[in-house]
Amino acid sequence: MPVSDPRRVAILAEGLFTPQTAKTAIGVLRYAPYPVVAVVDSTRAGTDSADAIGVGRGVPVVGTILEAIARGATVLLIGTAAPGGRIADSYRPLLADALGRGLEVWNGLHERVLADPALRDAAQRGGGRVRELREPPADLPIGGHRQRRAATCVVLTVGSDAAVGKMTVALELVRALERAGKRAAFVATGQTGIAIAGEGISIDAVVADFIAGAAEQMVCDAAERADWVVVEGQGSLTHPGFSGVTLGLLHGSAPDLLVLCHDASRAEVKGFPGLSLKPLPELVRLYEDAATWSRAAGTRVPVVGIALNTSALDLGAARRAVQAAGTATGLPAADPVREGAAGSDRLAAGLVR
């Protein structure tokens, strides 16, 4: 996004500005190329964003939309997720206030903002517009009919589970490749990635028949401007709720390489108590096999690195988890956030060797 872009973003996180509930806020505060001027959460007003979620040092938490506007906000981004993807009732008055004052609202939830008559009326009164981050294009193709530019390498981040950091790893890999002098592009497939990159398709909002086609279209378009295309993964092949999205993305993106992402503190599938996660070596084999199902005979799509999320562990436990993952799989392992550039560079080195 150009430096001169007039959009200045405030993040709506009312009552939910925590590491567990503010995934979109965390991603945007960490990676967005545009200025974030405030977070709106009246329960934490007067504090700093980094004190609540560990990122965004210097971004103030304010209590009202008017305070965010006073700090220059022209956009209000919904920065949290609610069960079922619905807009929280506590958010509706704040969204009405923003739209009534002419702010643009960015919504990554499944429920559409203007489906609420009160919010639609507020937008009409104040001139506020809505950008639905999860709204897919209307003319998506079925996958398997377009070839990307030759000499490009596609990397897909895949997961041991949902919400393990696949978007974060993809963005860190792009940064590492760029540090190594490579032309790299990030392909956003979820609402947070789209909010950061300014473009993309939210795969989980696409009709199932067109998931592969959407992924193929984004990868082919990105390959026209980059030699390395890093695709943000979604869900997990072993997650009972999200595996269909994962498989469609795996087929449509047709990756050359895979990076397996894993939350080192997690032993059970998210949302399914009692269902154990599969061991990393088994997941490596599963993904490598599935990646070839729609490919020519003899094609190999290897997992080339293990990216760990160790944010819930202390430093000693984190180091042991990284070492154990590398030993178990025989692959480079790192936490690209906790270790910074050293960790992401180690993973990126596994891509180009």
Image (cartoon, rainbow, N blue to C red):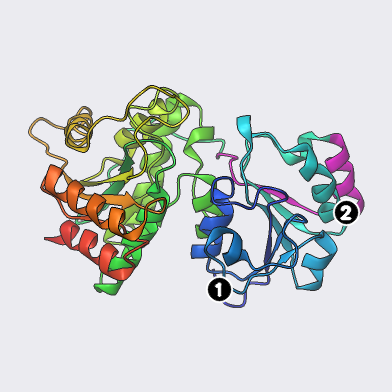
Kindly identify the amino acid type of the residue bearing the numbered disc 2.
Gly
Q: Is residue 134 magenta?
A: yes
Q: Nearer the viewer, mark 1 or mark 2?
A: 2
Q: Is residue 46 magenta?
A: no
Point 20% across, 46% down: residue: 256
User: Which portion, as a residue range, is magenta?
Assistant: 117-136
- Rendered image: mark on residue 164: none
* Local crowd size for mark 1, using a 10 Å CA cut-off: few (<14), some (14–19), many (≥20): few
Q: State the CA–CA distance, disc 1 to disc 2.
A: 27 Å
Image location of residue 263, percent across then percent down: 35, 44
Q: In this figure, which residue is indicated by the disc labeled 1? A: 2
Report if residue 198 is visible in the image.
no
Kindly identify the amino acid type of the residue bearing the numbered disc 1.
Pro
Instruction: Give left or right: position of 53 versus 225.
Output: right
Point 77% across, 66% down: residue: 68
Instruction: Give left or right: position of 320 versus 112.
Output: left
Instruction: Give left or right: position of 208 versus 135.
Output: left
Q: Quadrant of residue 346?
A: bottom left
Do labels 1 and 2 touch, CB within 8 Å? Answer: no
Residue 212, above or below 63: above
Q: Secondary structure at mark 2?
A: helix
Report if residue 106 is visible in the image.
yes
Q: Quadrant of residue 349?
A: bottom left
Q: Looking at the image, which is closer to me, 122 or 90? A: 90
